[in-house]
Image: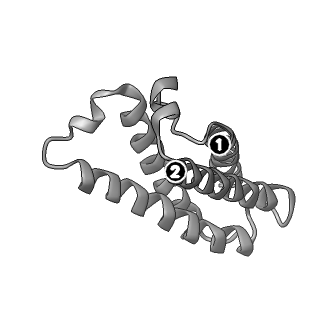
Amino acid sequence: MRSFALTVFAIHTLFELAFGASIFLAGASSSATPDMVAAQPVAITISFRFMGSALIALGVLGGLVIFGPGVASVTARVIAVGLATFHALGTAGSLFTASPTFEAYTSPLALGAVVLHGVLALGFVVIAFARPAS
């Protein structure tokens, strides 16, 4: 179980830090073209930078678990509940917003993001409800 938890936390940490830094620095989504970024209002750029900083914070939280109390700790299980909630709500909200046509998922990047969030949500649920090591 420890290997599974370490894998989930490590993947989560790396992706959140990478995507968060990308969004924060660009002030836009990774799918935005340079023309779209240049034309977007400042308020949207600010929103993307806030989103990027939130993702970076989630990545740092995962890193703190890995390098702090460890992925098999009670702390990791408690944090896994919060991360599972975040990723499950993100996945559900994305699917709800895209329904009934799901046209938003014609891009492999968009579909990959929703799949990754769904898989991370399930991984964190497993960690949260795993039996503690005896």
Q: Which mark is residue 120?
A: 2
The residue that mark 1 highlights is: 11
Q: Secondary structure at mark 1?
A: helix
| Quadrant of the rendered image containing residue 5 | bottom right
Q: Is residue 93 above or below residue 39?
A: below
Residue 81 falls left or right of residue 69? left
Q: Is residue 81 above or below residue 11?
A: below
| Quadrant of the rendered image containing residue 81 | bottom right
Q: Residue at x 54, y 70 (%)?
A: 129
Q: Residue at x 45, y 31 (%)?
A: 36
Q: Are marks 1 and 2 in contact (CB under 8 Å)?
A: yes
Quarter that holds the C terminus = bottom right
Residue extending farthest right: 68
Q: Residue at x 70, y 59 (%)?
A: 57
Marks 1 and 2, how far apart at CA: 9 Å
Question: Is residue 5 or residue 29 the one in the foreground?
Answer: 29
The disc, 1 or 2, on the residue closer to the chain's N-terminal end is 1
Q: Which mark is residue 134?
A: none
- From this viewpoint, is residue 134 visible? no
Residue 37 falls left or right of residue 106? right
Q: Position of residue 46 (x, y in %)?
A: 58, 53
Question: Is residue 124 or residue 98 the one in the foreground?
Answer: 98
Q: Is residue 127 above or below residue 25?
A: below
Q: Please tell me how crowded label 2 is: few (under 14), some (14-19), or many (20+) other residues with Cα within 10 Å.
A: many
